[in-house]
Amino acid sequence: MNENNPNTNGDIDRWVEWIKDCKYLPETDFKQLCTIISDIFFEESNVQPVFSPVTICGDLHGQYYDVQELFRTGGYPPDTQYIFMGDFVDRGYYSLETLTQLLVFKAKWPDRVTLLRGNHESRQVTQVYGFYDECMKKYGNANLWRFCCRLFDLMPIGALIDNEVLCIHGGLSPDIGTIDQMRTIERDQEIPHRGGFCDLMWSDPDDIDWWAISPRGAGWLFGEKPTNQFMHNNQLSLICRAHQLVQEGIKFMFDEHLVTVWSAPNYCYRCGNIAAILAFHTATNHETKLFNAVPDNERVIPAKTTTPYFL
């Protein structure tokens, strides 16, 4: 990736230091970063293979200072390998800085950071819930937002730990029965309004037997039977997903065959929840790590608030 440009590694090292202070990159640097990340994403599969030990993280939603607490809790890369299960942007004050830090880490240590797409990594959603407006405010134009949306289209949609733990943002789909079907999805597009790709981004587990209409208006509610069926068909030991606020940070369902991980503490700066990450020592040996939001006196709070709506 970087062999043909001797300056690239130096640029990445400079960006690693720059983003530590919750600063977004100059426009030309960010475009260069996007080019580097695009090349990496092009080489990754729809369902990216990952090997333990690895730590998985749920929604972050632009809460930069709380993401630093996540890294203090779980360790910074490259010492800790991570899978982030999407929803990096929107609602928080610092979506741009949060996304930039993850992209810089991905550029620096591409084999130690896996970034999966969430339902908020889309053009339509980011225009409503804050990221588009943030890019416009900080850069004065929509060019960088467009670059980000192009990256979103290239992101993997799942990860498979040791061939037996599946990580996705949302949930299951009645149109997708195997991981091999996930591998055949044309991911290089805006997330559709319906169908298997949409469901993987939007679906939620519920205490039902099979399938039900989702109140979100996209995806499905799925129960224990389709979960067990999917796990049996694909020889899985666990399904990990994010997408839903969990007050305790983590929630196991369906006889601990499925887990929801939520990594944005005090979501939207008012929900009062704690956050979690899940560290896998092996595919069958995992440890929950909880953390709280950073106190207000340890963060910078901008004057303008973000859209206080829950999706």
Image (tube, grey):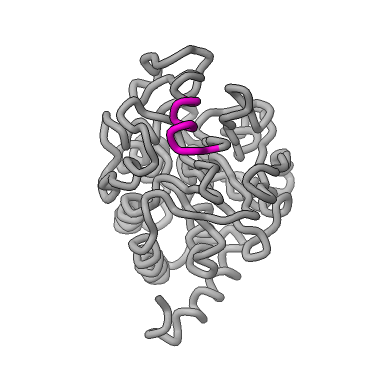
Q: Quadrant of the N terminus?
A: bottom left
Q: Can the viewer see residue 291 in this picture? A: no
- Residue 62 vs residue 156: left or right? right
| Residue located at (30% from left, 38% from top) | 124
Residue 98, compared with residue 274, is above or below; it is: below
Q: Quadrant of the C terminus?
A: top left
Q: Nearer the viewer, residue 306 or 230?
A: 230
Q: Nearer the viewer, residue 210 or 143?
A: 210
Residue 260 location (% of width, % of height): 57, 32
| Residue located at (39% from left, 37% from top) | 119
Q: Can the viewer see residue 252 in this picture? A: yes
The residues colored magenta run 227-236
Main secondary-structure element of the magenta-colored stretch: helix
Residue 74 location (% of width, % of height): 70, 52
| Residue located at (39% from left, 14% from top) | 212
- Residue 229 vs residue 177: left or right? right
Residue 228 located within the stretch drawn in magenta: yes
Residue 28 location (% of width, % of height): 37, 71
Residue 21 location (% of width, % of height): 62, 62
| Residue located at (41% from left, 49% from top) | 47
Residue 240, compared with residue 158, is above or below; it is: above
Q: Nearer the viewer, residue 174 or 137?
A: 174
Residue 79, compared with residue 224, is above or below; it is: below
* Total residue callouts: 0
Residue 33 located within the stretch drawn in magenta: no
Q: Nearer the viewer, residue 77 or 81?
A: 81
